[in-house]
Amino acid sequence: MTLDRDTFFIDGAWAAPTSSGTIEVISPHTEEVVATVPEGTVADIDAAVAAARRAFDEGPWPRLTPQERIDVVQVFSGLYAGKLAEMADVITAEMGSPTSFSNLAQSPAPWMQIEAFLGIARSYPWEEVRDGVMGMPVMVRREPVGVVAAIPPWNVPQFTIMSKVVPALLAGCTVVVKPAPETPLDGYLMAELLHEAGVPAGVVNIVAGGREVGEHLVAHRGVDKVAFTGSTAAGRKIAAVCGEQLKRVSLELGGKSAAIVLDDADLTQAVEGLKFTALMNSGQACVAQTRILASRANYANVVDALAEAVGGMQVGDPMDPATEIGPMVAQRQQERVEKYIALGQEEGARLVVGGNGMPDGLDRGWYVRPTVFADVDNGMRIAQEEIFGPVLSVIPYDDVDDAVRIANDSDYGLAGTVWTGDQAAGLDVARRVRTGTYGVNTYTMDFSAPFGGFKASGLGREFGPEGLGQYTELKSIYLEAPTG
Ligand code: NAD
């Protein structure tokens, strides 16, 4: 089956591109072209925004009742559930996510998001009447925010598209999605399912392209809200444009999260957990907990256990179900990670496993060796900057207060974990670390609860009723006092 495409999805139809430019999707494993798709231009984005604008200003979608929209999204959910394996394969093909992770998270998690948002929408206070304090009732309505620009990154493409498209749909918005150029393929499969589910023309439009078309979409006067997931650098630029235009914006940005291993932790359990929380998706995860904090007393034990576990991880073909670490998404990402590995050595950190060079047994593909650095000072660049690859820094702490101080000594504040035999002690640490999400002996995201970042990790929240609220405008309607 070919993954090639020659159209975009605009106004409910497969629309021909306005230019002949193409994106070659290259397998990070074979370095061969797996598909060719059109590259979106400013004119394609204009057509998509015009369709979304029409669908919002004149079309049926915002005027349906919440229950009518829920019914359509429920059909979409059922269709999506039937395509999880295919979706996982497409994502592995386009960006090299190990198939074990694709089948665990890349496609099931978006489907779980749809189901969670459906549940939230069913009991959401779309329109409520409050008693008021002026002796008269007041109606509070949650109305759709309008045309949404949804801009996802390549690392978890469906996950970050769905976290925007589904709440936008349920709220009655219309959407233009601009997938990243590395991952344009999964959006086509999603578009087919939305179409089949009966989402009206123009309600969701998809045009893949690079940064320039992203910038055009963000600044477009036809867009009411930007929902962005990506780097903090891009997030700052987008926030500036939206600030200027007083456009609604939500930003899910980078992270440099810390996992704190307390001395009473079950080390086997902690290291097994850290293999996932630090290295999921080959380390290409915003929530990756790549700073591992261990007490000086327990430091050597933690370093040894991590070195053994990480050194034994299977690296290679992402389609092999046994693979734990796949390739980096692109050559530039492989080079970036290798630069950080060299930098760590220059900064004086001790390389205990990994290092630069191809992993054993591989002679092509954009691979790096899973790497663990010990004796890392939290002030080093490898501890402060997001590497976005399988590189861990083990940092010593004096006591729990010191561990919390180090965890908080970061520009970011997205995620984190504490590993301990004492849940109350873990909860105490969780309350003190300034991040938007946190786990005690686990890091299992739950779509009923808000997700997002403190500090430079973002603005606003996705998931939960709070995430649905990001796609609404509040309106208060003052009513006459009831007579009689
Ligand atoms: P990126 O910022 O380079 O690009 C993200 C998306 O934005 C792409 O679609 C890109 O084409 C587009 N883009 C880039 N600059 C833009 C601009 N100025 N205006 C409009 N669009 C623009 O990020 P990336 O390399 O694709 O993704 C990795 C980053 O995403 C990491 O920093 C990671 O932490 C972050 N991320 C965050 C979350 C979260 O939920 N907080 C989730 C996943 C990834």
Image (cartoon, rainbow, N blue to C red):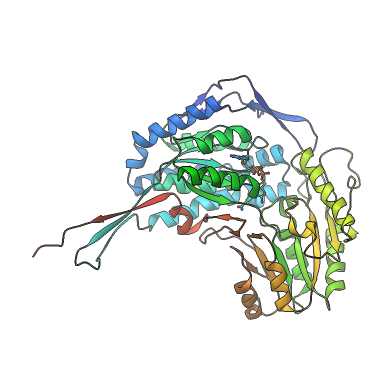
Quadrant of the rendering where the N terminus is positioned: top right
In this picture, is 129 found above or below 149?
below
Where does residue 229 sit, x and y in percent of width and height? 59, 47
Does 129 sit left or right of 434 as displayed?
left
Residue under the image location 64 percent in, 51 percent down: 105
Q: Residue furthest left?
A: 484
Does 262 sit left or right of 221 as displayed?
right
Where does residue 90 sit, x and y in percent of width and height? 66, 38
Residue under the image location 89 percent in, 52 percent down: 355
| Front residue of 246 and 200 | 246
| Front residue of 360 and 76 | 360
The quarter holding residue 320 reads: top right
In this picture, is 187 found above or below 299?
above
- Ligand number 1: quarter of image: top right
Q: Residue furthest front?
A: 244
Where does residue 104 sit, x and y in percent of width and height? 66, 52
Residue 317 seen anywhere in this rendered image of the structure: no
The quarter holding residue 311 reads: bottom right
Quadrant of the rendering where the C terminus is positioned: bottom left
Residue 221 seen anywhere in this rendered image of the structure: yes
**Total numbered labels:** 0
| Front residue of 301 and 348 | 348
| Front residue of 32 and 128 | 128
Where does residue 238 sit, x and y in percent of width and height? 56, 44
Does 440 sit left or right of 130 as displayed?
right
